[in-house]
Amino acid sequence: MKPVTRTLTPQELEIMKIVWRTGRASVRDVYEAMREKRAVAYTTVMTMMKVLERKGHLRAQREGRAHVYTAVRPQQRVLRDMVREFLGRVFNGSAEPLVQHLLRDGQLSEAELRDILRRLEEDA
C-alpha cells in the first residue's frame, strides 16, 4: 500500500484554496465553487475532501446532515512546505537556480523585481 503523503495534488490544492478563502466549507460549498471553473462530480469532491481529512489538512465537524470542513494547517505553512519539497526535488534544495530560471524566462514583472529588491534591502 502506498504511504499517505501530506503533499497536495493540484486538485487537493484547489480544494484547500477554497476552504482557506472561506474559512469553513461543506462539500456542497466546495463543489459549487469548483463548478464555476470546470465540470466536477459531487462525489469526487466529497472523496477528495475525505482524503484531505485523512492526510491531516482538513477537519470535519457534523452540522445537521452535512459535514463542515476547516483547514487544520495555515495556508502559508502548507505553501512553504510545498515550495521546500519542490526545491528539494527539482533544484536539490537550492533556491538560486529557481530564481535564475524565473529571471531568464521573464516570469517576474518589473514590479515584482522591485518588490523583491526592496525586501532584500529590508532584510540586510
Image (tube, rainbow, N blue to C red):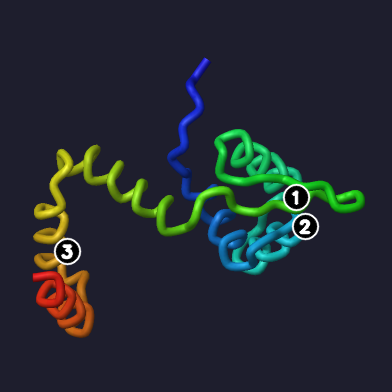
* Helix, strand or loop at mark 2: helix
Q: Which of marks 1 and 2 is nearer the N terminus?
A: 2
What amino acid does circle 1 point to?
Tyr
Q: Which residue is nearer to you in this view: 30 or 119? A: 119
Residue 52 lies left or right of residue 120; in this view the side is right
Quadrant where the C terminus sits is bottom left
Label 3 close to label 2 by CB (< 8 Å): no
Q: In this view, does 30 lie above or below 7?
A: below
Q: Distance between the residues labelled 3 and 2?
A: 38 Å
User: Which residue in the structure is indicated by mark 3?
Assistant: 102
Residue 91 lies left or right of residue 49; in this view the side is left
User: Which residue in the structure is indicated by mark 2?
Assistant: 28
Residue at the spot x=43%, y=50% of the render? 78
| Residue density around tag 1, few if under 14, some if 14–19, many if 20 or more, within 10 Å | some
Q: How far apart are marks 1 and 3 (CA)?
A: 37 Å
Label 1 close to label 2 by CB (< 8 Å): yes
* Helix, strand or loop at mark 1: helix
| Residue 42: image tag | 1
Q: Quadrant of residue 24?
A: bottom right
* Helix, strand or loop at mark 3: helix
| Residue density around tag 2, few if under 14, some if 14–19, many if 20 or more, within 10 Å | some
What amino acid does circle 2 point to?
Arg
